[in-house]
Amino acid sequence: MPESADLNALAKDICACQRCGLYKTATRAVPGEGNPHAQIMFIGEGPGFNEDQTGRPFYGAAGNFLTQLITSIGLKREDVYITNIVKHRPPGNRDPLPEEIEACKPWLDRQLEIIKPKVIVTLGRYSMARFFPGVTISRIHGQSQKCGEYTCFAMYHPAAALHQGSLRATIEADVLKLPKILEDIKKREQPTPVPIPAKPPPQEARQLNLFGF
């Protein structure tokens, strides 16, 4: 599949990236993984310790919760695509800096171009800010809106449920909205059927009607 080859080539470029200083302290890059034809793309903030060690996104406790969320809507991790705003781990799991997010922007842009997801799910406030600028996650979570050619859906980061147990039910309820959003998008994309004009009666039948037969 050409999309898979494109993503593999892109991953190699990301692993060699030195656009910002994060590569100096990271063990390895974490480009992303999943279905190159995914209809849903999850975008987190940045790799944590486990992701930095394995090169896989959402691989620790928060990743286990994300897997549960994906399963709750009848999908598997292999059905979606998972990545982050920045592709190298910020030291000490600190928040990514604006210049680091900007340096990584071309990589995320290219992933979106290749995969062309129907829905982008932002996980956490930093990925949310890319598509929902100027709003707070407490106000926008569980809502979707059109962002250019994409439909974007904001959610709390799965790690938030690990630190604040009261958010777990909110996150679980939000993710259950995704199938309906996807269904509505598919309905809008269906072409409007063109009515087929009725065929005129055969020439012989028209001539008989002229004589009242």
Image (tube, helix red, strand yellow):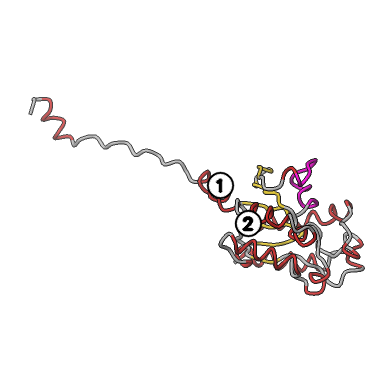
Specify whether residue 128 is painted magenta. yes
Q: What residue is drawn where x is 68% and y is 55%? A: 169
Q: Secondary structure at mark 1?
A: helix
How many marks can you see? Answer: 2
The residue at the far front in this view is 166
Pinpoint residue 159: horizontal percent, then vertical percent. 77, 61
Labels 2 and 1: the sequence-earlier one: 2
Tell me if 207 is positioned left or right of 90 in this view.
Answer: left
Q: Quadrant of the C terminus?
A: top left
Magenta part of the protein: which range?
Answer: 125-138
Q: Which amino acid, by three-letter code, is at mark 2?
A: Ile
**Quadrant the N terminus occupies:** bottom right
Horizontal and vertical percent position of residue 68? 65, 65
Question: Relative to 20, is 4 on the left or the right?
Answer: left
Residues under labels 2 and 1: Cα distance? 12 Å
Foreground of the two, 116 or 201: 116
Residue bearing mark 1: 185
Say what amino acid the circle numbered 1 marks. Answer: Ile
